[in-house]
Amino acid sequence: DAPRALLALEGISAGYEAGLVLSDFSLEVGAGEVVTLLGANGAGKSTVLRAVSGLVPVVGGRILWQGQQIGSGKLSRVERIAHTGLGHVPEGRGIFPDLSVRENLRMGYFARGEGTGQGDDEWERVLEMFPILKERFAQRAGSLSGGQQQMLAIARALIGMPKLLMLDEPSLGLAPLVSEQVFEKLREIVAGGVSVLLVEQNAHAALELADRGYVIQRGRVAISGTADELRADSRLSESYLAVH
Ligand code: ATP
């Protein structure tokens, strides 16, 4: 038997009231795989992640999680995150600036289901992984640097013990050195066995981390392949790799 994909989008159509953004869009992430989704601004990358999280309705095709169909409306967003092992770090990080670092992290813990005791070990493990957050525990999240806020958003998702972590432009707005630190952390997370679906504007950095990638154009897959194939693809070097 072929190994079953952790996540499979099969010809999905999805979008907003104003109109469909994705049409007949397909993508797979295998267990333990790092997959990157590249494309121009407005191509629909964030919409793909939102469709998986249940934040935008899927009106055609289907999404399979570990072989089981998840449909919009069947599982609420919170349930997906809590019970299915799906972590979503949205663009702009989605942290609560007026809450402390600790309170922000607790949101991830609640999402997993407080009282189950399931998150207790994870809480300690994640704090060890991000010593800077431990140091700033009581500080307002909004007073952290951009890189630290991104680390906080990733740490919060990890406390929910995801099997798959979806990241939307984690390096956006960060200085190159800080962006490199974020990618270093992602490498650690991947080494720990978490699968990743990464939306990135920095195609070079993304393809260094990824096993495979897809290029999305106007809501459809335009190019897909292994990271090596994509790096060597002249269509990519013209449109994406050259500019960064
Ligand atoms: P970017 O890198 O700019 O975030 P993206 O590839 O992630 O681009 P999406 O954010 O998925 O693109 O947006 C795809 C299309 O959907 C764009 O035309 C955008 O204007 C539109 N869109 C995004 N969010 C909404 C929304 N909340 N309501 C209506 N249209 C939206």
Image: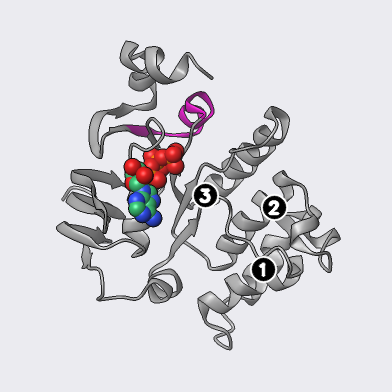
Alpha carbon distance from label 3 to label 1: 18 Å
State left or right for residue 120 relative to residue 54: right
Residue shown at 44%/59% (left/top)? 163
Alpha carbon distance from label 1 to label 2: 11 Å
Q: In the figure, 224 relative to 121: above or below?
A: above
The C terminus lies in which quarter of the figure?
A: top right
Q: Could you classify mark 2 by the number of other residues whose Cα lies within 10 Å: few (under 14), some (14-19), or many (20 or more)? A: many
Residue 203 forms part of the magenta stretch: yes
State left or right for residue 20 relative to residue 242: left
- The residue closer to the viewer here, 76 or 41, is 41
Dot 1 falls on a residue whose secondary structure is helix
**Residue stretch rendered in magenta on the structure:** 202-214
Q: Which mark is residue 105?
A: 1
Residue 37 found in image quarter: top left
What residue does disc 3 label? 91
Dot 2 falls on a residue whose secondary structure is helix
Residue shown at 36%/18% (left/top)? 236
Q: Which mark is residue 238?
A: none
Residue 56 forms part of the magenta stretch: no
Instruction: Name the N-terminal-most of marks 3 and 2.
Output: 3
Alpha carbon distance from label 3 to label 2: 12 Å
Residue shown at 30%/75% (left/top)? 75
**Which amino acid type corresponds to the residue marked 3 in the rendered image?**
Glu
Q: Is mark 3 within 8 Å of ligand 1?
A: yes
Residue 80 appears in the rendering:
yes
The percent position of residue 61, horizontal first and vertical second, equals: 14, 55
**Which amino acid type corresponds to the residue marked 2 in the rendered image?**
Gln
Q: Nearer the viewer, mark 3 or mark 1?
A: 3
Residue 49 appears in the rendering:
no
Q: Which mark is residue 149?
A: 2
